[in-house]
Image (cartoon, grey):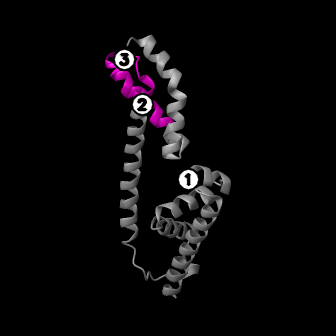
């Protein structure tokens, strides 16, 4: 495939690949990066690519790139959770001694220990400010399931924060 043919075919199916990446990664910025990586990887192999089944090749390659990103995120999350378990459960502190950044750090570590679904919903609602309907669409859940997951997540974080604060007094 020559340069013009490759660029024409890629541009023809680029939006489909991007939408597929957004569906897998649930992050537009990461999907843009994945689309750029896809172009780079296919560009290096353009001479071996044929016109037939270009779209399926594009989508399979995009899926593989996205799964690599998901695996990397999972490894980073596991590492973060392991680090958060190194915090003693009975840290000696009083609430008035904690700065806002200290409380935020403790809350982030507690959120990282939540089940993945609850942590994802909590992030999308509290950090990204998305509506329940948007979160439901992104996570492929009902709005009721999203509300329940958010409620459980907030309750768990609250209980753990209160536990840590009460142990310090």
Give the quarter of the image for residue 19.
Answer: top right
Q: Secondary structure at mark 3?
A: loop
Image position, residue 58 (x, y; %): 43, 28
Which mark identifies residue 139? 1
Closer to the camera: disc 2 or disc 1?
1
Which mark identifies residue 38? 2
Residue to which mark 3 is pinned: 50
Comparing 10 with 140, the one in front is 140
Q: Earlier in the sequence, mark 2 or mark 3?
A: 2
Determine if the magenta segment contains residue 41: yes
Secondary structure predominantly adopted by residues drawn in magenta:
helix
Which mark identifies residue 106? none
Q: Secondary structure at mark 1?
A: helix
Q: Is residue 151 above or below residue 10?
A: below
Query: Magenta span covers which residues?
Result: 32-57
Q: Secondary structure at mark 2?
A: helix
For the residues labelled 2 and 3, the Cα–Cα distance comes to 16 Å
Image position, residue 135 (x, y; %): 61, 54
Closer to the camera: disc 2 or disc 3?
3
Q: Is residue 158 above or below residue 24?
A: below
């Amino acid at each position: 495939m020559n340069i013009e043919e490759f660029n024409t075919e890629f541009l023809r199916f680029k939006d489909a690949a991007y939408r597929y990446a957004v569906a897998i990664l649930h992050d537009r910025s990461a999907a843009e990066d994945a689309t750029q990586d896809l172009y780079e990887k296919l560009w290096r192999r353009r001479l071996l690519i044929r016109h037939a089944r270009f779209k399926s090749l594009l989508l399979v390659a995009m899926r593989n790139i996205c799964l690599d990103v998901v695996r990397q995120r999972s490894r980073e999350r596991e590492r973060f959770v392991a680090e958060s378990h190194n915090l003693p459960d009975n840290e000696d502190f009083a609430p008035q001694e904690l700065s806002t950044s200290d409380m935020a750090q403790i809350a982030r570590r507690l959120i990282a220990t939540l089940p993945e679904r609850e942590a994802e919903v909590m992030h999308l609602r509290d950090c990204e400010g998305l509506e329940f309907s948007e979160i439901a669409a992104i996570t492929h859940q009902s709005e009721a399931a999203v509300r329940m997951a958010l409620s459980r997540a907030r309750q768990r974080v609250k209980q753990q924060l209160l536990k840590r604060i009460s142990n310090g007094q």
